[in-house]
């Protein structure tokens, strides 16, 4: 009897289906990991459990004005009752609900309170990301050790700082360098300009309380940096025609 395990040994199947790296999930973490691996020349396979999303074509509410939604962008009481967990997500509304799973389709048991916000599609929850890009500070990384909860982080801010810079230069993050220890500065594009009321409030808060009123750190584009990946929108919270998904919102 011939050795049947070697019958197909000369086909290209093994080479075609062999990879240097396999990434599970295509959300922000998996997507970024795959990008970095591919840029380093590794043959990378990305596995995603959700549906495929084609750029532009599969953003059905991208340019829909708020007044054209049946409920003006709001979630109905029936939907809230049927989705008590997923409806707590900050970006969940009538214009983005198609990028979230339904609670009844993917139930889970909570032994302790835990809100599992999920979006099963290529891109994962990056499609409903709010673009906020504040760095963690040393206070955040040392908090478990200082306050005695959970597990101490194995890294500190100094370890992560160069990687924050690496990401910020790629996606484009706006902000002002305020020198606040608890809110580290980064590789910033020009910040959104404060209006006269905000500027006055900033001055009053500092004069009376010595507290900071800082411009938010958001992913955005700017004429000086045409290659960055995100753009702002001034319309309801929904997918934008680039990497990130949500518009400018007052904060």
Image: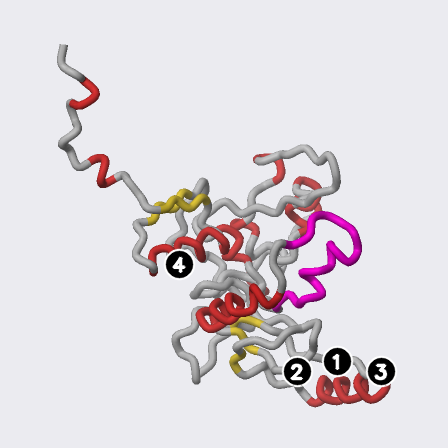
Residue 190 horizontal/vertical position (percent):
54, 83
Residue 124 horizontal/vertical position (percent):
49, 50
Q: How many numbered discs, if any?
A: 4
Asked if residue 78 shows in the view, the reply is no
User: Which numbered disc, 1 or 4, marks the residue closer to the eye?
Assistant: 4
Q: Which mark is residue 212?
A: 1
Check disc 2 and report the residue beneath it: 178
Quadrant housing residue 133? bottom right
Residue 30 horizontal/vertical position (percent):
46, 51
Check disc 3 and report the residue beneath it: 209
Distance from Cα at disc 3 to Cα at disc 2: 17 Å
The 10 Å Cα crowd at callout 2, few under 14, some 14 to 19, many 20 or more, is: few
Q: Secondary structure at mark 1?
A: loop
Taking the magenta stretch, the answer to whether it contains residue 73 is: no
The colour style of the image is secondary structure
Of mark 1 and mark 4, the one earlier in the sequence is 4
Tell whether label 2 touches label 1 (CB within 8 Å). Answer: yes
Q: In the orientation shown, which residue stands out farthest toward the right? A: 208
Identify the magenta region.
Answer: 135-153
Q: Which mark is residue 36?
A: 4
Q: Is residue 168 above or below residue 88?
A: below
Of mark 1 and mark 2, the one earlier in the sequence is 2
Q: Residue at x 70, y 72 (%)?
A: 182
Of mark 4 and mark 2, the one earlier in the sequence is 4
The 10 Å Cα crowd at callout 1, few under 14, some 14 to 19, many 20 or more, is: some
Of mark 4 and mark 3, the one earlier in the sequence is 4
């Amino acid at each position: 009897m011939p050795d049947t395990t070697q019958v197909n040994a000369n086909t290209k199947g093994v080479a075609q289906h062999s990879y240097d790296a396999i990434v599970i999930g295509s959300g922000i973490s998996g997507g970024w990991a795959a990008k970095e691996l591919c840029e380093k020349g590794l043959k990378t396979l990305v596995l995603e459990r959700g549906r495929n999303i084609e750029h532009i074509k599969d953003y059905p509410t991208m340019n829909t004005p708020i007044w054209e939604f049946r409920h003006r962008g709001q979630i109905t009481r029936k939907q809230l009752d049927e989705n008590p967990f997923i409806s707590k997500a900050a970006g969940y509304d009538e214009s983005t609900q198609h990028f979230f799973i339904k609670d009844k389709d993917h139930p889970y048991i909570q032994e302790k309170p835990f809100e599992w916000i999920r979006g099963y599609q290529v891109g994962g929850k990056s499609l409903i990301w709010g673009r906020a890009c504040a760095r963690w500070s040393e206070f955040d990384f040392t908090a478990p050790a200082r306050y005695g909860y959970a597990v101490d982080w194995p890294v500190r801010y100094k370890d992560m700082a160069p990687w924050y810079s690496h990401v910020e230069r790629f996606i484009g993050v706006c902000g002002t360098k305020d020198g606040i220890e608890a809110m580290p500065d980064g590789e910033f594009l020009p910040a959104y300009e404060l209006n006269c009321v905000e500027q006055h409030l900033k001055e009053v808060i500092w004069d009376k309380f010595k507290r900071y009123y800082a411009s938010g750190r958001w992913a955005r584009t700017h004429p000086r940096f045409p290659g960055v990946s995100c753009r702002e929108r001034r319309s309801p919270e929904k997918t934008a025609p680039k990497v990130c998904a949500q518009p400018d919102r007052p904060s």
